[in-house]
Image (cartoon, rainbow, N blue to C red):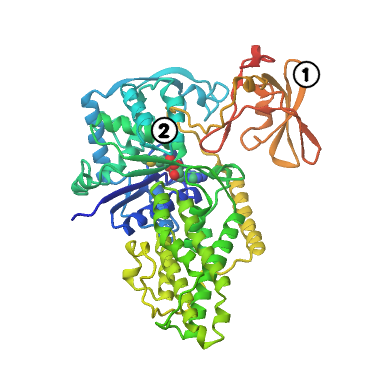
Amino acid sequence: MENKKFYITTPIYYPSDKLHIGHTYCTVATDAMARYKRLQGYDVMFLTGTDEHGQKIENKANEAGVTPQQFVDNIVEGEKGVKDLWKLMNISYDRFIRTTDDYHMTSIQKIFKKMYEKGDIYKGSYKGKYCTPCESFWTESQLKDGCCPDCGRPVTDAEEEAYFFRLSKYADKVRDLLENTDFLLPRSRVNEMVHNFIEPGLEDLCVSRTSFKWGIPVDFDQKHVVYVWIDALFNYTTALGFLNDRYDDSDYNKYWPADVHFVGKEIVRFHSIIWPAMLMSMEMPLPKHVYGHGWLLLDGGKMSKSKGNVVDPYLLAERYSADALRYFLLRDFPFGSDGNFSNELLINRINTDLANDLGNLLSRTTAMANKYFEHSLPAEQASGKEDEDIISMAGALRGKYEAHMEKYAFQSALAEVFAVIARANKYIDETAPWTLAKSEETKPRLARVLYNLAETLRICTVLLTPFMPDSCVKIFDQLGVPSELRTWESAAEFGLMSKNASLCKGENLFPRIDAAKELAELEALQEAKKAAADTEENAKETNTNMPAPMEITDHEEEISFDDFCKIEMRVCKIMNCEAIKESKKLLKLSVFDGERERCIMSGIAKWYKPEDLIGKNIGVVVNLAPRSMMSGKYVSEGMIFAADTTDGDASIAFYNDDTVGMRIH
Ligand code: ME8
């Protein structure tokens, strides 16, 4: 009988910079899922790759003085690049796609043409603001003070020929898909998509650009390049040979549709609205699920390369091992929600779960087998009343674990395994093997205790294999587990190992970390990185001049209308603005709110110079409780409106003079 298939993907990452812990998080989760399915006997296709086109990469390459191709080659294939990182992290991908691969580019041209011939892509005109000296199109929201954000010169209204995808045509079908199926997971993400994007009305999507060259040319109209998201999304099918001859399209027939795309929550919109709509247009089957996972945050905010606050997975994996990092990422953070990353959490988790609970259980079990029985347990064994609980827990573990894994609840699956490990440690205390060892009479009981420990460990290790593949092999070796008892099937049953199990104490797999020392060292290393990022002149990446089709949002909890009315927002004029010597981040603004001047301290020094702000009118929340800052030296009496851009920059909207003092609703 042919194996069951399982096709799983990560997003294809932008090689605009080195990847960080957030990318690693998603890839490790995908890898754990792929390994789990292989363990179950599925024929798995695990795809990852890089999304290499677009204005941002073109700009970065220009800054670096190399061609875009050289730039991405270096980040993907170069030393400590994407592929090196995945090797270090033990990522078992089956295929790696680069969107600059010829076969992919050919397929995308064919796909674009197909949708055009069908009438779902049509030529129209894109209206925007044009900066003639820069030859760049901007949307209204991208302008800085009404002018070109690159050079600061005035812009004019202009129209440019562009191709559009009839997204509007598929709105009802997509809505139905989201609301009435389990296509988008976790379910909590559905509301946001429907509410924010579908209900306001889906507009047709601009899917070609003429303002830059680094993309896939539309083959029947070469001055246009294909919008990077069409190029990117279809990777999931071109990598299987869809409309190309790099891979036999039997892979496409075999694996498509994907079982699940793992993606971060900020790109759920592309995967749950635009992607199914385009597949519907192409009359292709839809993926079974899109899972929008949460973000790893640092100090409560998103990691961003330009803020210099990214966590380097390379450094952590080299210091503590890939397995420890993999385990921590999937044990500490519930996959569907955001979580705060910290070095402290990482080190605590390694020390408590891996060094203490698992590491100790293994070393105590093997050491006792060595000491009391010279490795091999005798066949004569005696059961006891303490055995029942641990045997039933270990026997039931696989079922519980599977239920969580099927819901991508890695954290809960691991919690189940570690509950059994904790139970086994308690079992050692209850049975006190060191006392049993004192008399020949109790040796059979001692043998049985050690056997039960080894069996419990064996079952746990099978289930930990998708998470810590290397360490699990070493654990199996120390326990003397034969290959046929390292399988998924064998994890369902307690007592399969031969009674004469031969155990052998080996290396300490998870050495305890001196937390205080390590934390200080990590902090010093990360501070050095931050300082380097601060001084890097080009840290602030230039904006792309693509029309942003929809805004990326991260929504807070809903509030009532009454609560909303309590927030008083006004247009205020900036009368004065200065840098302060105590902080590199803060600017001190004095703003006039229509009645009086108030002081506002705002963390925008990195993006705005004081002289650029004086005289401008901005939005301010004016009834926020005053906050004392810098040990009471300043009191901030309000908060200004500034948008967090996807690059981690801040962007302030400015108002006309005749609105000063007016309330904003
Ligand atoms: O969006 N926490 O690429 P990208 C958790 N090329 N996950 C994070 C994260 C964080 N702080 N930061 C990044 C793109 N990620 C497109 C995708 S797919 C057809 C095209 C992970 O390099 C998360 O999975 O910006 C997120 O969706 C992805 O990296 C974005 O990677």
Above/below status of 506 relative to 313? below
Q: Residue furthest top?
A: 658
Image disc number at residue 168: none
* In the foreground, 331 or 382: 382
Q: What residue sits right under mark 2 in the picture?
A: 269
What is the secondary structure assignment of the residue under circle 1?
loop
| Residue 480 makes an appearance in the image | yes
What is the secondary structure assignment of the residue under circle 2?
helix
Circle 1 residues within 10 Å: few <14, some 14–19, many ≥20:
few
Residue 6 located left or right of residue 184: left
* In the foreground, 118 or 155: 118
Image quarter (top left, top right, bottom left or bottom right) of the C terminus = top right
Q: Residue furthest front?
A: 385
Amino acid at circle 1: Arg
Q: What residue sits right under mark 1 in the picture?
A: 596
Q: In the rendering, at what x and y percent does residue 648 appear?
A: 55, 38
Residue 286 located left or right of residue 607: left
| Residue 61 makes an appearance in the image | no
- Please name the residue shown 49% across and 50% down the image: 20
Image quarter (top left, top right, bottom left or bottom right) of the N terminus = bottom left
Amino acid at circle 2: Arg
- Please name the residue shown 25% across and 43% down the image: 256
Q: Disc 1 versus disc 2: distance between alpha carbons?
A: 43 Å
Q: In the rendering, at what x and y percent does residue 402 appear?
A: 39, 53
Mark closer to the chain start, 1 or 2: 2
Circle 2 residues within 10 Å: few <14, some 14–19, many ≥20:
many
Q: In the rendering, at what x and y percent does residue 664 appear?
A: 63, 17
Above/below status of 569 relative to 101? above
Q: In the rendering, at what x and y percent does residue 166 appear?
A: 31, 23
Above/below status of 518 relative to 410? below
Does the residue at mark 1 contact the one at mark 2 (Cβ under 8 Å)? no
Label 1 beta carbon within 8 A of ligand 1: no
